[in-house]
Amino acid sequence: MAHSYEQLLSFDVAALGEKLQAKEISPVELTEAYLDRIQRTDDKIRAYITVTADLARKAARKAEHEIVAGKWRGPFHGVPIALKDLCYTRGIVTTGGSKILADFKPGHDCTVWARLSRAGAILLGKLNLHEFAYGITSSNPHWGFARNPYALDRIPGGSSGGSAAAIVARSAAATIGTDTGGSIRIPAALCGCVGLKPTWSRVSRHGVLPLAYTMDHVGPITRTVRDAALMLNVIAGHDRNDSTSSRERVADYTQQLDAGVGGLKLGIVRELMDGLSAEVQRSFEGAVAQLRALGATLDEVTIPSLPLSGIINGIVTWAEATEIHQEWMATHPQDYGDDVRRLLEVGMMIPAGAYVRAQRARARVLAQAMEALASHDVLIAPGTAIPAPKIGDSRRLDSDSGSVDVLTGILRFTQPFDVTGQPAIAIPTGLSSDGLPLAMQIAGRPFAEATVLQVASAYEKARGALPAPPPICSN
């Protein structure tokens, strides 16, 4: 059965896996559809820094031969994906979104890509990001400003802005992002897709350019919750090349997706319910009502030290990022974008005592979150306080709640779960009156990704499909 390019681009990974295995779709035809889509949209979206078209075509031919021969590797076999350009790819430029690494070609693959490659995934290219992952706008001065597919004058969020924009623009079937202060969940929330930050240590960070060693997470950005679960199945697990990666058993994260939420207890985090724009509040309340209608019990919980998370995350990231960039700041300070250089300069002034106290305080926030989870299965909160702001805006005017600081309205919702290292997912709840995505966040106990995905999946099915963004093709 022949499919048009538009039909091929409409399938999520779960559907593609079935159709590729059944030989209803050719990996070669599918890859050409995605490469064509990149060519027709990316001058507007700027999701990509590097497109690996020749390598993708070669991998697609190999995948087709293997599938025809009955050598099926799993749901990602023959599926075209893309990686945030922090992820090492052997012999392929890995820039970190920077000028400093504009010509850097690693000698090995990062573990995440090595596992996806072994699973048969096809690499379309490397995705745009906030320089060195140090920001939330993806307004990159070196490689172009990534843009939100729902409104090209809006940020896609950061730092994994290209990873989310590519999903929503349908220029990749699935992508990888990283999250230090919210950089998987923020772009997913602002672009209207699914972003899963796994438990810290659940996914290897070997070969992924670091921002802050003790805060960095790697995870999927996808169209659906099921796709996120399928991707986590491939990338999770201990890696001897990453001494911080956990030996905790890897579950099949798809097993609980259809279990529903009947009988589950969900805690609404009190400290994340103020300062919301009126539309975010209405959308979140609608999601709460939907979860209740599905049979979940919801009540309010408190994590008293959670408001400290922003400064804890900031101090740890400032200090660790400055140590990582110490040599380049000494030799190439002029090659950084102004915003990233300023943040690294701030890090130079963080006293050792402040860093140690911030690390100690993380345990208190986690202990209080675990206390809330002792009687609840997951915690829920809005994904951000505001929809995507316009590129360049530092404040956003909301007709009901007035002027909102953009950084505060976004980061304070995501930073707490980097501080604690808990798994957390961002999932769309609808669109604002001006057509911008709104989102909810679901967080769980460490290594309870299956429960987080279970709740997200139940809600996603009840919510139904999100309206598509406006057409963005250039020709």
Image (spheres, helix red, strand yellow):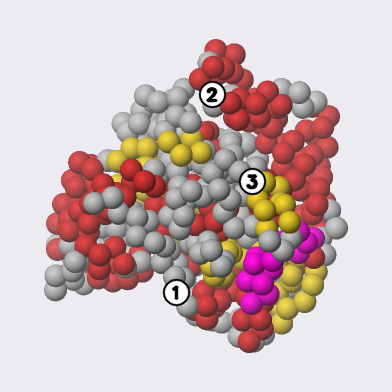
Query: Which amino acid, by three-letter code, is at mark 3?
Result: Gly
Which residue carries the number 2 mark?
336
Q: Which mark is residue 113?
A: none
Does 142 appear above or below 457? above
Instruction: Give the crowd class for mark 3: few <14, some 14-19, many >=20 residues within 10 Å.
Output: many
**Residue located 14% across and 57% down the image:** 65
* First to last magenta residue range: 271-286
386 left or right, relative to 364: left
**Residue located 45% across and 29% down the image:** 142
Which residue carries the number 3 mark?
181
222 left or right, relative to 281: left
Which tag is nearer the camera, tag 1 or tag 3?
Answer: 1
Q: Position of residue 238 (x, y in %)?
A: 52, 49
Tell me if label 1 and label 3 are in contact, CB under 8 Å.
Answer: no
Which residue carries the number 1 mark?
465
Q: Look at the magenta stretch and give its main secondary structure.
A: helix
**Mark-to-mark CA distance, 1 and 3:** 28 Å
